[in-house]
Amino acid sequence: MPAERRRGIATVCLSGTLEDKLTAAAAAGFDGVEIFENDLLASPWSPARVRRECAHRGLTIDLYQPFRDFEAVPPAVLARNLRRAELKFDVVEQLGADTILVCSSVSPDAVDDDDLAAQQLRTLAERAGERGLRVAYEALAWGRFVNTYDHAWRVVRAADHPALGVCLDSFHVLSREVDPVAIRTIPGDKVFFVQLADAPRLRMDVLQWSRHHRLFPGQGAFDLTSFVDHVLATGYRGPLSLEVFNDVFRQSDPFAAAVDAMRSLLLLQESADAAPVLEGHAFTEIDVDDTAAARVGSALAGLGFTAAGRHRTKPVELWRQGGARVVLNHRRPVDGGHAAVTAVAVASTDPTTSSARAKAFLAPSLGSSAVAAPDGTSVIFCRDDLDWLADFAPFDTAAGVLDAGVLDTDHVGLTEPFDRFQQAGLFYRAVLGLDLADEAEFAAPFGLVRRHSVADRGHRVRVALDSTLVRRGTWGPDVREPQHVAFSTSDAIAGARRMRDLGAPLLDIPDNYYDDLDARFAPDPDFLASLRSLSVLYDRDGSGEFLHFCTELLGDRVYFEVVQRIGGYQGYGAVNAPVVMAAHRRRRKSAG
Ligand SMILES: O=C(O)c1ccc(O)c(O)c1
Ligand SMILES: [Mg+2]
C-alpha cells in the first residue's frame, strides 16, 4: 500500500468537544477528518469557522455525515427530504468539503422499491452535482431494505449519476454474511469513501454491536487487511478513514485515543518488512520498597534463583536462574510492602531497528532503547549478548548456586485498566511485532476478567494482558490488579517439590479443584496425587498439556509463577486463574 495514502478519522471516534477532537486528530498526525453531524450541532463554531480551524491544524474535511432516511419515499416526503438535503449541502459547502454521506434508510416512510430508491438518489445527486458536491451512499447493516454493500452498489449503479457513489464501511460489510470479495467488481471511481472499523465477534443485534462495540483495526476479529485489499483493488484513491463508535473510547483522553487510532492504521498499512526477531525475555524489572524487597528476594531464593550482582550505579539487584532474570529496583521511597512490575526487557536481534519501529508506531520514548507502554510499563530492547550485564558487579556466588530447574522467563502477566485494554494489546502488537496468541474470558472472584495474550511467532516473548470492567472492588480495597512473572521449567512436579524444600512461599490450592480435575480429565491417580499434594494446577487442550503453580502475593500485587508446557500448549491456564485469585485473596485475609 503506498505510504502517501491519506489517513482520516471521524470525529465520532474521539471524546470531547469538536475543538478537542480536531486538536487530538491533528496531533496524532491525521490528514483529514469526517465531521459527524452531532459534533457540529453542539459546536459554537460556524461551519466556515470549522473549516478554518481544520485548515490551521493541517486537516482537510473529507466527509460530512450522516444524512439519514432519504430514499424510496412517497412524493410529499421526497419534497421535504430534498429541502433538508439542500440545507445540508449548504453546510458541506461552508465546511469546504465535497462529499456527504447518505445512509440507507431505516424510515417507516420508505418502501421496498429499488427503482424508486435509485430514481430519488439520482435526483439528489443531480442537486449535489450542480454544486460540485458528491453523495456517498452507505448501506447500514440494519437498513430497512438496503443493508448490504452489494445492494447499495446495485442501487447506485441503477441511478447512474456521476455525483453518486458508494461509501464502503468495513463494519457494515463484515458484520453481514455477504462475501466482501465482490467489492473488487465496483469501479474505483464509484467508491466515494471508505470507512474502517473492526469489532469483536459478538452475537447480538447488529445496531447495538455497531454503536457500542466497534474497535480500531486490529483490535477485533474482522479481517481488515483483506477488506482494504479489496477496496484498493477497485482503484479507490481516497482516504482510509476510521469510524469507530465505542463506549469506552468516547470517554477516553482523545489524545491517547487518536494515537491509538493512528497506530492501528499504521499497523494495517505496514509493509512486509517485519519486526526484528525477538529472542526472548532478557529480564523483568520489579520496583520494590524495603519490606517488599525482603519478601520478593526470599521468594526468588526459594524458587532457586541466585542473587547474582548489584548495579554499579543504581540500587538495583540482579537475580538469575537458567535464562531467567529478575531485576529488583529499590527505588520505591515509601515503605508499605509495595512491589510492581515496571519494565519488560526483550532480547532483540536488532535493538536499533526495534527502537526505530517503536518510534514509527508512536511509542513514547524513554531514552535510546526504551519506550513507554500505555500502562506506564517500560519496554526495553536489548541484545542477547547481554552487554548490559556488565553494569552489574557480580556477587561472590562461590558458596554455591541453587537451582530448581527454572529454564527461562515464559511470560509476563500485566493487568490493564479497562479503558486502556484495547490500546495496550495494540501497542504490544505494533511496537514489538507480536501477534494476538490467545483470548480468554473467565469469571474471577472480583470480576469478569478478559485476557488477551500476545506473543512473537517463536513464542519466546509472551505478555498476558488482563482487564476487568471496574478497576478494583471498592468493598475489598486490598484487592489490587495483580501482575506476575512466569518462569518455564521442564518438570513442574519436581520443581514444586524442590522449591517447597527451599522454602518458596507457594500458594495452596483447595481439594475441590483436584476433585474436579479428576472428574474432567480422569488423570492417572498417582499423577493427580502429586498435583494435589504440591498444589500444582493442570490444564489440557487439543495440542498439549500445561502444569503450573504460583507463589503467594509478594507485596500488594506481584507474584511469581512456574509453568511447564507439554506439546503445543500455547495458553496460560486461564481456566485455573479464578482458583489462583481466590487463593491469593484467602491468604491476604488470613495475613491481614
Ligand atoms: O450508527 C449509525 O447510525 C451510523 C451513522 C453513520 C455511519 O457512517 C455509520 O456507519 C453508522
Ligand atoms: Mg459508516
Image: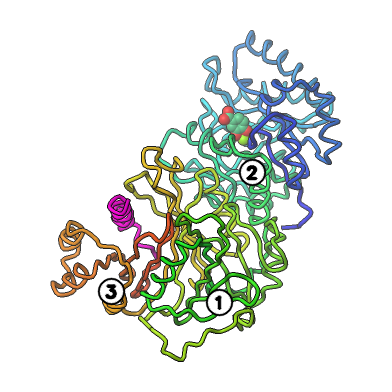
Q: Position of residue 93 (x, y in %)?
A: 82, 25
On residue 279, which mark appears?
A: 1
Q: Quadrant of ligand 1?
A: top right
Q: Residues within 10 Å of mark 1 (few under 14, many from 20)?
A: some
- Residue 327 within the segment the image draws in magenta: no
Q: Nearer the viewer, mark 3 or mark 1?
A: 3
Residue drawn 69% across the image and 26% down it? 39
How far apart marks 2 and 1 lie (CA) works out to 31 Å
How far, Cα to Cα, is label 3 from label 1?
31 Å
The magenta-colored residue range is: 571-592
Residue bearing mark 3 = 500
Q: Is residue 258 above or below residue 111?
A: below
The residue tagged 2 is 257
Mark 3 or mark 1, which has the lower sequence index? 1
Q: Position of residue 537 (x, y in %)?
A: 27, 65
Q: Amino acid at mark 1?
A: Glu
As shown in the figure, which amino acid type bears the numbered disc 3?
Arg
Question: Does residue 205 appear in this view?
Answer: yes
Instruction: For label 2, count other residues whose C-alpha is less than 10 Å away and answer few (under 14), some (14-19) or many (20+).
Output: many
Q: Is residue 395 above or below residue 192?
A: below
Instruction: Decide which of tag 2 and tag 1 comes sooner along the chain.
Output: 2
Asked if the residue at tag 1 contacts the one at tag 3, i.e. Cβ–Cβ closer than 8 Å, the answer is no
